[in-house]
Amino acid sequence: MSGIPAISVNNVIKSFKDVKAVKGVSFTIKKGEYCALLGPNGAGKTTLMEMIEGIQNPDQGEIIINGQTWKKNELEIHKILGISLQETNFFDKLKVGETLELFSSFYDLESERSNEILDLVNLQEKKNALVKNLSGGQRQRLSLGIALINRPEILLLDEPTTGLDPTARREVWEILFRLKKEHNITMILTTHYMEEADYLCERIIIMDKGTVLADGTLDQLVAKNNGAEIIEFSIEGEASNGFKLNDEKIKMVRDDKNEKWKITVDDIASTLPSFLEEMKQKGIKIKSLECRKMTLDDIFISMTGRRLDE
Ligand SMILES: Nc1ncnc2c1ncn2[C@@H]1O[C@H](COP(=O)(O)OP(=O)(O)OP(=O)(O)O)[C@@H](O)[C@H]1O
Ligand SMILES: [Mg+2]
């Protein structure tokens, strides 16, 4: 029954005393889709993930996984989910191989499965290392390995690469890519890193303050934000506090943090000459100028006035 969505989240609400952590979120994830839940600290990502994972109950709304609900089909759902939490405590005195064997035994799996996982997450050479001696990246891969042990159809990963350096992060990405290609897994991962969402996931859901701000492919999100390209520049002298361009169609925003101006345009090549000409006529000297594609960070700023990492 491939027509059934992998995950449906229908108008889900969750509060903790006076904190409204998730305020009516809805979305549907198709089978085989890789979706990033992107948002700053406190956006409600973990709370939402834990409700999908059956760890917390929504106050209102409904979560359906593969056509089933936690209330009625707990065992069936557990069989198809692979979960990695934002913070995982392993048994530090166990070796990597022993840890995987322990988790295999929870699922009644053959012990050969732990060897397959060591291959899958590139930890074969650490089989006999104590878990407490693993590097941050190796620990995250072990955590991913544990999530994969029961051959899940759906992976739910809460910040699988936070705190990792670019090389270690890339290693995790490569594993996730391979899983998509070879096993058609469905995945939701939460992240603060826009590059991660952009690189790994065809679908991006931006959350802030408990609600969904945007949902779609990167191209769709860019299209909703008046343009696809950005000219970012800084200028010398008094005008740096404020000035206007004649073309009213151009949206100009000043970022006080780095004292730069930003214009969003459809096409840099056709806008840049008239922009430079106008700056010259106004007698404004440009200190720096960068032309680039719109990023998820630009989209987040235009929606909230804040940066993703603030
Ligand atoms: N068990 C809890 N008790 C009280 N408040 C909570 C609890 N869990 C989460 N919250 C609050 O709910 C809001 C959302 O938290 P959540 O952990 O879901 O955010 P997040 O998007 O995962 O953030 P981060 O990126 O920092 O992990 C926050 O204001 C948080 O303080
Ligand atoms: Mg979180």
Image (cartoon, rainbow, N blue to C red):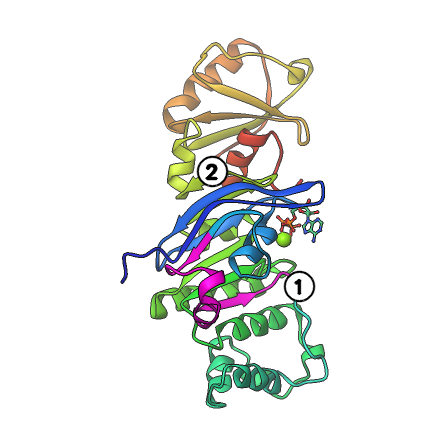
Q: Nearer the viewer, residue 286 or 195?
A: 195
Say few, some or many: other residues with alpha carbon within 10 Å of mark 1 (under 14 / 14 to 19 / 20 or more).
Answer: few
Q: Earlier in the sequence, mark 2 or mark 1?
A: 1
Residue 13 placement (x, y as % from top left): 56, 44
Q: Nearer the viewer, residue 39 or 282?
A: 39
Q: Which residue is mark 1?
A: 87
Q: Which residue is mark 2?
A: 214
Question: Which residues are the magenta region?
Answer: 63-86
User: At 43% across and 70% down in the image, what residue appears?
Assistant: 76
Identify the amino acid type marked 1: Glu
Q: Quadrant of residue 217?
A: top left
User: At 61% across and 73% down in the image, what residue appears?
Assistant: 138
Q: Is residue 81 magenta?
A: yes
> Marks 2 and 1: CB-CB under 8 Å?
no
Q: Quadrant of residue 102?
A: bottom right
Disc number at residue 58?
none
Say few, some or many: other residues with alpha carbon within 10 Å of mark 2 (under 14 / 14 to 19 / 20 or more).
Answer: some
Residue 69 placement (x, y as % from top left): 45, 59
Direction front: furthest residue:
72
Q: Nearer the viewer, residue 264 or 206?
A: 206
Residue 289 placement (x, y as % from top left): 54, 29
Residue 96 placement (x, y as % from top left): 61, 83
Rounded to the nearest angstrom, the CA distance separating label 2 from label 1 is: 27 Å
Identify the amino acid type marked 2: Ala
The correct choice, above or below, for 217 with respect to 262 in the image is below
